Amino acid sequence: MAMKTVWIILLCLFAISQADQGFDVRHHLSTVTRYSASKDVSQNLIEPSNVPSECTPIHLNLVARHGTRSPTKKRLRELENLAGRLKELVRDAEARKTPSDKIPGWLGKWISPWQGKVKGGELIRQGEDELYQLGVRVRERFPTLFEDDYHPDVYTIRATQIPRASASAVAFGMGLFSEKGELGPGRNRAFAVTSENRASDTKLRFFECCQNYKSYRKAKEPAVDKLKEPVLNKITASLAKRHDLSFTKQDISSLWFLCKQEASLLNVTNQSCELFTPSEVALLEWADDLEVFLLKGYGNSLNYKMGVPLLEDVLHSMEEAIKAREEKLPTGSYEKARLRFAHAETIVPFSCLLGLFLHGPEFEKIQKEKPLELPPQPPKTRDFKGSTMAPFAGNNMLALYSCPAASSPKYFVQVLHNEHPIPLPGCDGKDFCPLEDFKTKVVTPHLKHAFDNLCNANAKQKPSSSMFSLLSSWLFGSSHQTEL
């Protein structure tokens, strides 16, 4: 019996080892995940609807996040400070005669790859390629939409005033219109990218224009930090014991940030990322996703309701395309695609307005403007993941189809998330949805509040009592506490 028990333990350990060997940290970086690591994950994939061959796309809406970018100026300073801190930790360990095999060899010699940079946040080459290739694939997927000669009123390209977003729009446009012009060896052509003032861009930077949201976010950030604290405390203690180094919670936070940057931007996974076990990475990813959920996503209805001007703009563009078709306007005289480039703070709320990654009862909740339960902690599975909802270059496309005149209904919308059809809870879990159902079941329930009343009313909107009780139960209640 004892020998049998030993064999069972060995088999379990072998299975865990094999699972760890198949683990790729690059798939678990929340919203710092590269598009190539996220685009084709199984969570995104469903059996797509059979779009009738007689149905043709007549208009495309795209809402995309900028591509992979460098660390921001504030984060560059954090990494510079980390380099000095790591040397200090190694000196302290050596003074205490810590065995050298406990200390990762790179730790005391590490220098930030961004050392000396004074500006950050720009689109990097990999980010340019992500958007360029996306543009190429979009044209290949919808050839009839992009067969016309370019005109800024036919193919509208908009970006926020943040340089990495406009640079992403340019990279996308270069792919979309490659070999369509006469400029240079690539036969490129010039195209226009328009932006609205940051202070008034309620379609793509609504999160910056909504004063009530800014107040909500400022008030909630300490509670979010409190929710994440047990994860950081546990992992700090584990790493300190594993390497006999006097890590602080701030050290672990900075090392996790470094891991995300190294893995995503530099494709380096054998330094800072190797400090963490797969289960620790899963917890850190979950903690990041909690922040996305509470401050950008389904955790509070204000997070996504403020994005209604964007949803209205999408619907308006569809209606204009239908009007042009009904009036039999000549091709090249009306808009065929409206292409937008923005941020995670745009993509996540817009995905929530569509009800993506929800099931029926959850969708009914958000239509009643109620917060959802927090994403369950690993090892439990969850649908809300920053890595799939808003990776670098993450996107939602809404293709409007016209079907034969004899069919009823005549117009349909297909929603693609990261280029894959995705079910809409508001359309009975289908990805190919009659336009009228899309309007009445997905869009209209969100049109209860004018943006100014929602965001800029004199009386600051207070978070709902259910939001407070949800946070309180996680922070102080026993019924929702989980083992960390």
Image (spheres, rainbow, N blue to C red):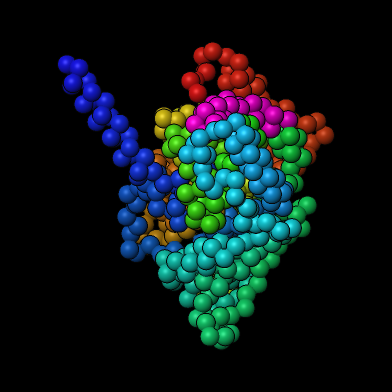
Q: Position of residue 208 (x, y in %)?
A: 73, 46
Magenta-highlighted residues: 219-244
Left or right, 321 with respect to 19, comes to right
Residue drawn at point x = 59 percent, y = 36 percent: 94
Q: Nearer the viewer, residue 250 or 351?
A: 250
Q: Residue furthest top?
A: 478
Residue 459 in sight in this render = yes
Q: Nearer the viewer, residue 169 or 351?
A: 169
Residue drawn at point x = 70 percent, y = 41 percent: 450
Q: Position of residue 203 (x, y in %)?
A: 67, 52
Task: For the N terminus, give its image quadrant.
Answer: top left
Left or right, 268 with respect to 195, comes to left
Left or right, 345 with respect to 325, comes to right
Residue 349 in sight in this render = no
Q: Nearer the viewer, residue 264 or 335?
A: 264
Q: Position of residue 41 (x, y in %)?
A: 39, 48
Tally of numbered discs: 0
- Residue 474 in the image: above or below residue 369: above
Q: Nearer the viewer, residue 119 or 420?
A: 119
Residue drawn at point x = 33 percent, y = 37 percent: 17
Quadrant of res 70: bottom right
Query: Chief secondary structure of the magenta span?
Result: helix
- Residue 314 in the image: above or below residue 466: below
Residue drawn at point x = 75 percent, y = 46 percent: 209
Q: Position of residue 424 (x, y in %)?
A: 44, 43
Residue 91 part of the magenta-drawn span: no
- Residue 326 in the image: above or below residue 108: below
Quadrant of res 288: top right
Residue 226 part of the magenta-drawn span: yes
